[in-house]
Image (cartoon, grey):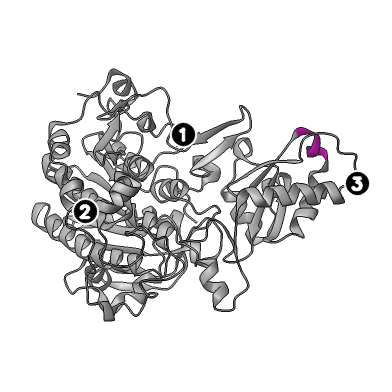
């Protein structure tokens, strides 16, 4: 049963169907099921680097061989983070319009640091963790899935599932029938926005403690060690020593959990396996794709992002993660074929962002970059401002904090914003530093325009900057993301199934075009608030 609160929010009543459809076999036709797959932190070049090692019956191989590959798909805004990425894929709009400007942001009106899916008016369901007070409340635009609900007069169903709450919530949209994510105990949970209690099948699944069962198997390489030549040596200085003092395979996951906690399993292929199992459970228990009304299922695999942050884009861990994900996706596609039927569903796969190289790895190879600690940069910047700003400083520092490539100034320093921008731009690792006014009115400059599309004044800093390529605010290990460089913006976009013929296009596609390309192939309406150029 849905909560009374959500029932008030839920779409009810008769709304005329939107008649933007394709003619298929002489009839107005749409797929029985739309499946959106987002791989968290997947660089498009992984499809090239790992191509020859994808299994013949693996998901990536099936998508590449029998689906359509939009090989030149990019983010058209900055920052490239998980929250904005999922929101933009799902709505067909940029953060400028849908409001999810980052994973966390500082609300300048209240000075409150907001999490993108935070909603203090709801309660956790299936967990006692307050971190599951989550909903799409902060998403200010309708999603493609919302459009499908409207199109079917609420007869179609919509669900989202992910390791991360934001990866489940934003694809499912405002009218979702359910969204499920993992809590710290590796159980799927939700919030009272959707329901007052977990469905019986979710509760039963949680009781099996599948994460604990999978943990006991450890993490072994998918292939022989000699075949991992496209990644770094197993033991290298760019990875933390989480495996009983090493970073080499095979991983003793029980020991790692004992040392780092149960949530460390989210960094491993176990996270993907649990999401896949829950997606298939929802598919079966909710009878998705079994009637004349189009249903939607959003599946987001978060574990590649955890692995990338931990071990880096060139690590053997990430390499093996994608080989295992290939097999997991292949299994998922075969389940869809059996349950819904080949040609009765459309599946598309993309990513919420890419990732940078590890700066220390690049520096050891002779490329002059480095990683920076946020707090150190704030301290150095404040010292520089005191030395160079022609004003008597007898008060607090000029820079209060740096969040999401935004610099927030204390009140006394705001009249000197332009001068501070010029001072900042002379420091490493900054390349371009803009004032908020320059981002609000970006003109024709490409970088400023991308920052503009990821910006809302009420959540923005006084200065907005871009770092030097591959310089990051991060620790010595692993990778991160957030910039407007190709390594962060270039993501895969593969589509297969209903109305899709095999092929490849190298024409540039923006991430905000994804759901519109799906709509064109499937005979479904464009996302209600997307832009079609």
**Picture coordinates of residue 372, whole percent (x, y):** 61, 57
**Picture coordinates of residue 7, whole percent (x, y):** 29, 22
- State the residue position of label 2: 273
Residue 138: image tag: 1
Quadrant (top left/top right/bottom left/bottom right) for the N terminus = top left
Secondary structure mostly taken by the magenta-highlighted segment of the chain: helix
- State the residue position of label 3: 390
Distance Cα–Cα, label 2 vs label 3: 58 Å
Distance Cα–Cα, label 1 vs label 3: 41 Å
Name the residue at the top extreme: 4
Front residue of 94/232: it is 232
Range of magenta residues: 411-415
Asked whether the beta carbons under mark 1 and mark 2 sit within 8 Å of each other, the answer is no
Relative to 371, residue 434 above or below: above
Distance Cα–Cα, label 1 vs label 2: 29 Å
**Picture coordinates of residue 236, whole percent (x, y):** 42, 71
- Does label 1 or label 3 sit earlier along the sequence? 1
Front residue of 178/317: it is 317
Q: How many marks?
A: 3
């Amino acid at each position: 049963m849905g909560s009374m609160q959500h029932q008030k929010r839920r779409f009810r009543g008769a709304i005329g169907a939107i008649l933007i459809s394709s003619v298929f076999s002489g009839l107005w036709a749409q797929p029985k099921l739309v499946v959106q797959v987002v791989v968290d932190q997947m660089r498009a070049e992984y499809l090239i680097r790992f191509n020859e090692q994808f299994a013949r019956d693996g998901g990536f191989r099936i998508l590449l061989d029998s689906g359509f590959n939009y090989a030149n798909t990019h983010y058209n805004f900055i920052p490239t983070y998980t929250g904005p990425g999922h929101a933009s894929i799902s709505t067909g709009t940029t953060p400028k319009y849908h409001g999810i400007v980052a994973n966390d942001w500082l609300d300048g009106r209240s000075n409150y640091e907001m999490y993108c899916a935070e909603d203090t008016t709801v309660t956790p369901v299936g967990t006692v963790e307050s971190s599951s007070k989550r909903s799409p409340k902060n998403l200010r635009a309708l999603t493609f899935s919302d459009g499908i609900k409207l199109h079917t007069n609420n007869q179609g169903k919509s669900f989202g599932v992910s390791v991360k709450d934001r990866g489940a919530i934003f694809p499912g949209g405002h009218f979702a029938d359910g969204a499920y994510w993992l809590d710290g105990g590796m159980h799927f949970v939700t919030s009272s926005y959707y329901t007052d209690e977990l469905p019986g099948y979710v509760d039963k699944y949680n009781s099996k403690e599948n994460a604990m069962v999978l943990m006991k198997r450890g993490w072994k390489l998918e292939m022989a060690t000699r075949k991992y030549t496209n990644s770094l040596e197993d033991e290298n200085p760019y990875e933390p020593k989480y495996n009983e003092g090493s970073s080499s395979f095979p991983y003793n996951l029980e020991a790692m959990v004992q040392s780092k906690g149960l949530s460390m399993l989210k960094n491993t292929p176990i996270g993907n396996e649990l999401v896949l199992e829950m997606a298939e459970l929802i598919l079966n228990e909710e009878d998705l794709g079994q009637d004349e009304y189009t249903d939607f299922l959003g599946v987001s695999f978060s574990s590649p992002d955890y692995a990338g942050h931990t071990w880096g884009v060139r690590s053997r861990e990430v390499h093996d993660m994608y080989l295992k994900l290939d097999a997991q996706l292949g299994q998922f596609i075969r389940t869809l074929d059996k349950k819904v039927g080949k040609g009765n569903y459309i599946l598309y796969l993309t990513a919420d962002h890419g990732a940078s190289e590890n700066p220390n790895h690049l520096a050891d190879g002779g490329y002059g970059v480095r990683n920076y600690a946020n707090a150190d940069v704030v301290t150095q910047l404040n010292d520089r401002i005191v030395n160079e700003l022609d004003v008597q400083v007898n008060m607090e520092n000029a820079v209060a904090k740096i969040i999401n490539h935004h610099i927030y100034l204390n009140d006394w320093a705001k009249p000197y914003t332009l001068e501070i921008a010029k001072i900042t731009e002379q420091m490493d690792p900054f390349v371009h530093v803009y004032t908020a006014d320059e981002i609000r009115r970006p003109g024709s400059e490409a970088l400023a325009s991308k920052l503009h599309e990821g910006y809302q004044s009420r959540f923005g800093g006084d200065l907005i900057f871009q770092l030097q390529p591959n310089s990051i605010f991060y620790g010595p290990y692993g990778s991160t993301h957030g910039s407007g460089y190709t390594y962060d913006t270039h993501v895969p976009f593969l589509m297969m199934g209903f109305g899709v013929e095999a092929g490849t296009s190298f024409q540039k596609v923006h991430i905000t075009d994804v759901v519109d390309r799906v709509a064109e192939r499937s005979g479904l309406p464009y996302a209600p608030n997307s832009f079609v150029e």
